[in-house]
Image (cartoon, rainbow, N blue to C red):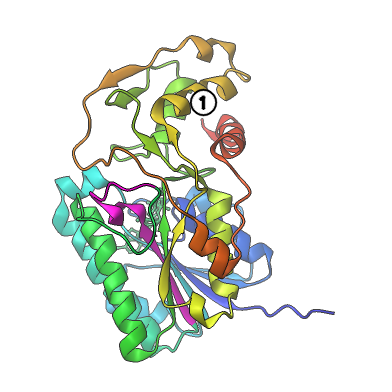
């Protein structure tokens, strides 16, 4: 009989969209989960299903504070570093805070992880690192120039991780997330991601505004595919699979017009009036790349990644969750 090893996993940004989903998943597997979060964009309601779990520990703190990082990594086997300020427009409006959190905060948690001798440091990288490179699909080894302060910070994370692997022998894996969506993603605020924002607007019978003509495309990635990649990154014993970065995506692309079509179709099953809500078209946004599509061959080959949810399958799940949970 296979014995299950129970690890202690630190999830920074564990009150956010991706971090809270990762927390729930690893708690269900019987692991101990520590969350370090300052609730700047995360929410307490994301923790309500497991906050009382005896295997769960919440540390309210800031990755910009090295002491908070040192406290959080004590006794930790694996770090899943998710804490960051997301959003390209936010980084354009306030590059200093984005850099403080995403670069200085990253370095703090990396140093603390090295000193605590964690087994592996797995971190949220970003498809924005492909910048102005035009080739599709994106392969990990070919990147372009960053198009926003946010993209710079995420690329710097990769550079630091690589140096820490080579210089200090810290095992690292970077997961370049591509437009992640799903349950618990925040629909509110100026920097909300497109899917939850559109869901909220359609539910209110308000017109979603598409930046540009709607023909920009993205490799929209359902949260459960992202969870699978984090799980595989923890589990892999393949030495050639570590100290590198992986596209974390489904491996298909859909336009914004397709996205709205599917959202209207699935939401109108709950409220038929949503089928009649019209879309409004606006200006293209600064820092946006026209098309994004990941090659997932590297993850398939080295990690045996096998994503289960396409955009449409993921959207059906997400829409039903939002319908039942958005007030
Ligand atoms: N959602 C996506 O499509 C996507 C795509 C690419 C990369 N990423 C990356 O994935 C990670 C998670 O993103 P998300 O979508 O869950 O965002 P999120 O905003 O929901 O979660 C981020 C969490 O980090 C916390 N945080 C922010 N600053 C902090 C600080 N200084 N100290 C401690 N905690 C802090 C926030 O409170 C929040 O709970 C981020 O690193 C993001 O850059 C996300």
Who's the residue at 50% across and 47% down the image?
251
Report if residue 134 lies within the magenta region. Answer: yes
Is 115 in front, or is 150?
150
Query: Which span is picked out in magenta?
Result: 120-136
Who's the residue at 27% across and 63% down the image?
155
* Image quarter for ligand 1: bottom left
Is 88 in front, or is 155?
155
Q: Is mark 1 within 8 Å of ligand 1?
A: no
What residue does disc 1 label? Answer: 263
Residue 51 visible in the current orientation:
no
Mark 1 crowd level (few <14, some 14–19, many ≥20, 10 Å Cα):
many
Q: Is residue 322 above or below residue 228?
A: above
The image shows residue 107 at horizontal and vertical percentages of: 27, 75
The image shows residue 90 at horizontal and vertical percentages of: 22, 46
Is 198 in front, or is 24?
198
The image shows residue 195 at horizontal and vertical percentages of: 44, 35
Please count the marks in the image: 1
The image shows residue 129 at horizontal and vertical percentages of: 29, 57
Residue at the far right: name it.
1
Who's the residue at 32% across and 17% down the image?
280
- Tell me the quarter of the picture where residue 23 sits: bottom right
Report if residue 161 lies within the magenta region. Answer: no
């Amino acid at each position: 009989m296979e014995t299950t090893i129970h690890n202690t996993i630190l999830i920074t940004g564990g009150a956010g969209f991706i971090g809270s989903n990762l927390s729930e998943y690893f708690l269900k597997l019987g692991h101990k989960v520590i969350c370090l979060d300052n609730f700047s964009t995360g929410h307490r309601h994301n923790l309500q299903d497991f906050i009382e779990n005896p295997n769960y520990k919440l540390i309210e703190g800031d990755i910009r504070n090295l002491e908070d990082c040192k406290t959080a990594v004590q006794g930790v086997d694996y770090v899943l570093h998710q804490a960051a300020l997301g959003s390209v427009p936010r980084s354009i409006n306030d590059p200093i805070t984005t850099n403080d959190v995403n670069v200085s905060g990253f370095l703090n948690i990396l140093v603390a992880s090295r000193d605590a001798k964690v087994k592996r440091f797995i971190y949220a990288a970003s498809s924005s690192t492909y910048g102005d490179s035009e080739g599709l699909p994106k392969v990990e080894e070919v990147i372009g120039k960053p198009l926003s302060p946010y993209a710079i910070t995420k690329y710097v994370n990769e550079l630091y991780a690589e140096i820490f692997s080579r210089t200090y022998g810290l095992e690292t894996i970077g997961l370049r997330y591509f437009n992640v969506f799903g349950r618990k993603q925040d629909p509110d605020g100026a920097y909300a991601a497109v899917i939850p924002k559109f869901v909220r607007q359609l539910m209110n019978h308000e017109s979603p505004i598409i930046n540009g003509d709607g023909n920009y495309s993205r490799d929209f990635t359902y949260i459960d595919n992202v969870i699978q990649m984090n799980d595989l990154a923890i589990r892999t014993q393949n030495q050639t699979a570590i100290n590198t970065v992986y596209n974390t995506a489904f491996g298909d692309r859909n336009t914004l017009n397709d996205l709205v079509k599917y959202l209207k179709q699935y939401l109108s099953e709950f409220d038929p009036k949503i089928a009649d809500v019209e879309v409004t078209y606006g200006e293209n946004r600064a820092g946006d790349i026209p098309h994004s599509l990941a090659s997932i061959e590297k993850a398939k080959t080295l990690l045996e990644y096998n994503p289960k949810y396409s955009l449409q399958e993921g959207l059906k799940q997400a829409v039903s969750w939002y319908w039942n949970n958005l007030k």
